[in-house]
Image (cartoon, rainbow, N blue to C red):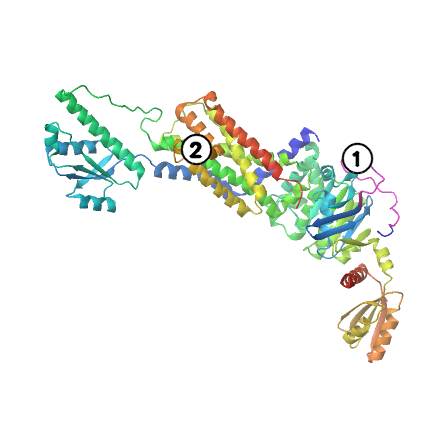
């Protein structure tokens, strides 16, 4: 496990129904959490700390073990090894106590499609023990916050993807849980809805809710307070987006070059080059170990007789860091 | 966790089930229409009463006495005389073509033998491919023949009359099938619809992904199971009522005993079938599998419970097996209450059987249903 950044400052108190047993402790803490399915190791030695009030992103390609990890944290899948506590309770032995204090939403937006928006909300309110006398008010409050007030009587199955997603989030937060698990909540949703969804996530976070969200959208990863990179069931790195990018030591540049494809091919052979992408005449280059990408590209272009018409440094993104890390791991895997 | 919260969760599930049922017009229509259709089909089509059996006569005697006997046979209502034949080859043709099911054969000199006091046998040729016809036909004819011979004995004073076995039928004196079948039909229809409706219930949640959402909630197993059973009990009782009322109106089927007793025991029976459906639901991955299991379960119920075939005539192992079917016990209860006016004490053993099966099913279902994935 890498070094953890300092815990965040004064955390707002979560407004969940139950007072939490251990206020100052991390809301999620795991040590060497593992899960095997037969011979296949889906999650291996995952050790994480998530602090109260943060938006914690779990990033990784499909099949990396993100969903398996979330399911273990929610207490619906038993770990085969390691241990973990969530909202102060053990994931293996106190799963039912955890379930009362978390919200859970998956990309399937598991709604009852034959019920109206309000009926769905009322059902989950009853399930999570929202007291009957405040239930109607709470449902209206959540409907309002999600911008669903006018669609309260619409049958859920007739809503579009973006609206279903809103209803699913409203259902998952009806009991104001201190901790919210979102498993690829924006899969298959249009960009506008995605943006609105993330605004809502930040609202919840400001209100004190801790959010653990999995995604493979890099722009979403940048909106998290902290990230964990998961690949083939193991955590490759944890930190704020800036820390993760900085730790890779990447320098990036964008150039406009004639014969970008050829230049890219030659650049790829160099050891200090981490990643080269080209789209038409545009070449994007990332280097490791402090090498200046603009200089390197100019040298190679010069050798090949290609003309560089424009060149500027670019900010290294989470995507650059992610691709770089996954590629190196894949190479290491092949070498082993 | 308090009982209040538990009840609130159970209630949430029950309300949700009712709302979903209300939206599912097709299922709702089926649940209402099924009893009516089944009742009409079974009540009118399955008539085990044997009447108007087509009969031919091969009269080699040709006397007034033989014609008189044949007419008496017709007068019983069981036989329809379709005409005379001349020889066994014609009898065979008539039976084979289905023109007749029974042939009555008078031997030559039959009346002469009677007059001389000799044994005068009659022959009844019966199409054995339908055992029920055989039994009724021979019974009626034998009875008639015995009555005649007795009359002869008495008239001619040859010895004292022999003691006859007189059969008296209670409870359903006309032996009408509808009276027997309609109460039993309530059990069959409830078995069919109740098992199926809950068998689909969890399978549907699994298919649509809402089951995972339930598993991750604080909902307990027992709350889910009861929440899925309770709403449908009301529906089962409604179905039962519609069958009994229609049975009364269409077929004059009475309820001799206590209606309250019948409904209390029916509650246990309905809950048992709903629990069985839930068990199927935990075994099935898809709604289709759940449906298939329900149909598969229906067949032994119809064959072994005593609904169609007499339970007493079954081999012992089959009888043991049938004890495990709630329908076997409910049939005895519903027939007992409706036709015989049986009381609580008479039917308690059957009710205990059903309660035992219900308890076993609830335990099995909650063991099968785990709040975990994989």
- Pointers 1 and 2 in contact (C-beta within 8 Å): no
| Dominant secondary structure of the residues highlighted in magenta in the image | loop
- Number of marks: 2
- Residue B107 circle label: none
Inter-mark Cα distance, 1 to 2: 63 Å
Q: Is residue B33 visible?
A: no
> Badge 2 sits on which subunit?
B
Quadrant where the image shows the N terminus of chain B? top right
Q: Residue furthest bottom?
A: A305
Q: Is residue B112 left or right of residue A182?
A: left
Q: Secondary structure at mark 1?
A: loop
Residue B287's spot in the image, x, y percent?
55, 46
Up the image or down, B120 lies above or below A230; here it is: above
* Residue A309 against residue B330 in the figure, above or below: below
Q: Splitting the image into 4 quarters, where does residue A120 fall?
A: top right
Q: Dot 2: few (<14), some (14–19), or many (≥20) neighbours within 10 Å?
A: few
Q: Is residue A5 magenta?
A: yes
Closer to the camera, B29 or B74? B74
**At which x and y percent is residue B369?**
62, 39
Q: Nearer the viewer, residue B33 or A33?
A: A33
B287 falls in the magenta region: no
State which region is magenta.
A4-30
Neighbour tally class for label 1: few under 14, some 14-19, many 20 plus, Cα within 10 Å: few
Query: Judging from the image, what secondary structure is the residue with disc 2 in?
Result: helix
- Residue toward you, B186 or B150: B150
Residue B316 is tagged as 2
Q: Position of residue B300 (x, y in %)?
A: 45, 39
Q: Which mark is residue A19?
A: 1
**Eye-nearest disc, 1 or 2:** 2
Looking at the rendering, which quadrant does residue B16 occupy? top right
Q: Chain of mark 1?
A: A
The image shows residue A261, relative to residue A328, as above or below, that is below
């Amino acid at each position: 496990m890498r070094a953890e950044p300092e815990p965040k400052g004064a955390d707002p108190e979560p407004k969940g129904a139950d007072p939490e047993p251990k206020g100052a402790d991390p809301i999620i803490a795991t040590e060497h959490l593992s899960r095997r399915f037969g011979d296949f190791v889906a999650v291996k030695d995952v050790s994480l700390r998530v602090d109260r009030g943060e938006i914690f992103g779990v990033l990784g390609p499909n099949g990396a073990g993100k969903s398996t990890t979330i399911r273990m944290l929610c207490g619906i899948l038993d770990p085969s090894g390691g241990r973990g506590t969530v909202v102060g309770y053990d994931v293996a032995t106190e799963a039912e106590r955890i379930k009362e204090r978390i919200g859970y939403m998956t990309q399937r937006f598991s709604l009852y499609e034959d019920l109206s928006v309000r009926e769905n909300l009322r059902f989950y309110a009853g399930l999570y023990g929202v007291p009957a006398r405040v239930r109607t008010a709470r449902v209206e409050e959540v409907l309002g916050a999600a911008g669903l007030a006018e669609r309260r009587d619409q049958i859920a199955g007739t809503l579009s993807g973006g609206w279903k997603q809103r209803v699913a989030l409203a259902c998952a937060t009806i009991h104001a849980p201190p901790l919210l698990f979102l498993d690829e909540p924006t899969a298959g949703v249009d960009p506008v809805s995605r943006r609105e969804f993330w605004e809502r996530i930040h609202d919840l976070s400001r209100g004190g809710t801790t959010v653990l969200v999995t995604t493979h959208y890099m722009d979403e990863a940048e909106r998290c307070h902290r990230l964990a990179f998961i690949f083939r069931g193991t955590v490759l790195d944890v930190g704020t987006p800036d820390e993760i990018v900085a730790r890779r030591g990447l320098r990036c540049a964008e150039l406009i070059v004639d014969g970008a494809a050829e230049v890219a091919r030659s650049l790829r052979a160099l050891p200090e080059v981490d990643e080269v992408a080209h789209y038409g005449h545009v070449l994007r280059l990332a280097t490791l170990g402090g090498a200046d990408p603009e200089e390197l590209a100019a040298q190679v272009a010069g050798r090949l007789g290609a003309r560089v018409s424009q060149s500027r440094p670019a900010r290294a993104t989470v995507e650059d860091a992610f691709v770089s890390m996954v590629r190196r791991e894949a190479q290491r895997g092949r070498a082993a | 966790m308090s009982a209040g919260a538990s009840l609130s969760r159970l209630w949430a599930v029950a309300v949700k089930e009712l709302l979903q049922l209300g939206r599912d017009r097709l299922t709702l229509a089926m649940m209402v229409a099924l009893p009516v259709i089944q009742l009409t089909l079974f009540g009118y089509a399955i008539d085990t009463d044997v009447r108007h059996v087509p009969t031919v006569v091969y009269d080699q005697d040709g006397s007034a006495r033989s014609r008189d006997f044949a007419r008496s046979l017709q007068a019983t209502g069981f036989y329809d005389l379709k005409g005379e034949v001349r020889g066994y080859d014609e009898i065979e043709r008539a039976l084979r073509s289905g023109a007749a099911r029974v042939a009555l054969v008078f031997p030559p000199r039959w009346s002469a033998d009677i007059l001389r006091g000799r044994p005068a046998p009659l022959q009844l040729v019966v199409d054995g491919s339908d055992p029920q016809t055989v039994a009724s036909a021979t019974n009626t004819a034998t009875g008639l023949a015995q009555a005649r011979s007795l009359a002869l004995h008495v008239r001619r004073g040859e010895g004292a009359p022999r003691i006859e076995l007189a059969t008296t039928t209670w409870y359903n004196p006309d032996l009408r099938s509808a009276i027997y079948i309609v109460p039993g039909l309530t059990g069959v229809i409830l078995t069919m619809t109740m098992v199926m409706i809950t068998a689909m219930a969890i399978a549907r949640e699994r298919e649509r992904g809402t089951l995972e959402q339930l598993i991750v909630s604080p909902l307990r197993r027992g709350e889910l199971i009861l929440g899925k059973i309770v709403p449908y009990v009301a529906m089962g009782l409604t179905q039962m009522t519609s069958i009994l009322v229609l049975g009364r109106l269409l077929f004059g089927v009475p309820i001799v005993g206590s209606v309250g007793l019948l409904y209390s025991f029916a509650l246990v029976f309905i809950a048992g079938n709903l629990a069985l459906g839930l068990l199927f639901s935990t075994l099935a991955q898809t709604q289709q599998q759940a449906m298939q299991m329900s149909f598969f379960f229906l067949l032994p119920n119809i064959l072994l419970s005593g609904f169609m075939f007499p339970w007493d005539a079954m081999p012992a192992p089959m009888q043991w097996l049938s004890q495990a079917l709630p329908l076997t016990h409910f049939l005895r209860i519903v027939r007992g209450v409706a036709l015989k006016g049986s009381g609580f004490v008479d039917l308690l053993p059957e009710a205990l059987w059903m309660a035992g099966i219900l308890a076993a099913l609830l335990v099995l279902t909650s063991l099968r249903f785990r709040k975990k994935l994989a």
